[in-house]
Image (spheres, rainbow, N blue to C red):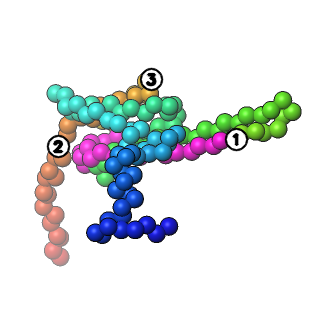
């Protein structure tokens, strides 16, 4: 639907942004960033990441390390169904959602270095501080015949 614009901006978007806030999410929905809030704490040995994942089970959460980026993925599916006395469905709702968040942890960190645990809806990751060790240049001699 086309809405009138005032000085190059959509007037109705501005009204709803002011009323609901710029990060308005409809009732019953959770934005990806809101459901994956993370606290990052620096320790002597590295970093501790505490990520809130309410409503997710341990089986719903995966952590992957690739090219120096650690990606946390949480996927959840739910189906509710109500039937009346005769067994006819009067309400059926389905929800499926996926959230993903990435952190740069460095190229020197391997998956064996990271410790992870999930308890009471909180994912805790211990990521060590590691600097990439410069490769020692070796001479590669060419045999002359």
Name the residue beneath numbered marker 1: 92
Give coordinates of residue 5: x percent, y percent: 36, 68
Name the residue beneath numbered marker 2: 131
Q: Residue furthest top?
A: 120
- What is the distance, in whole Å, between disc 3 and disc 1 at their CAs? 28 Å
Left or right of 86 in this view: 11: left
Q: Viewer-proximal residue, 8 or 127?
A: 8
Look at the image and say whether residue 98 sits in the magenta stretch: yes
Give coordinates of residue 30: x percent, y percent: 46, 41
**Residue sitting at 13 percent across and 57 percent down?**
137
Q: As displayed, is residue 47 above or below residue 67?
A: above
Q: Nearer the viewer, mark 1 or mark 2?
A: 1
Count the labels in the image: 3
Q: Which residues are magenta?
A: 92-111
Q: Quadrant of residue 36?
A: top left
Would you say residue 101 is visible in this rendering? no
Q: Nearer the viewer, mark 3 or mark 1?
A: 1
Give coordinates of residue 103: x percent, y percent: 30, 45
């Amino acid at each position: 639907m086309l809405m009138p614009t005032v000085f190059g901006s959509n007037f109705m978007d501005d009204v709803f942004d002011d009323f609901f806030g710029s990060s308005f999410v409809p009732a019953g929905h959770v934005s990806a960033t809101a459901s994956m809030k993370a606290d990052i704490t620096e320790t002597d040995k590295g970093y501790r990441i505490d990520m809130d994942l309410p409503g997710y089970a341990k089986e719903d959460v995966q952590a992957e390390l690739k090219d120096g980026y650690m990606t946390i993925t949480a996927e959840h599916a739910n189906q509710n169904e109500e039937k009346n006395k005769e067994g006819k469905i009067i309400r059926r709702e389905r929800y499926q959602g996926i959230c993903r968040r990435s952190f740069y942890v460095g190229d020197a960190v391997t998956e064996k270095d990271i410790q992870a645990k999930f308890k009471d809806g909180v994912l805790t990751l211990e990521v060590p501080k590691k600097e990439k060790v410069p490769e020692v240049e070796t001479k590669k001699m060419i045999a002359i015949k």
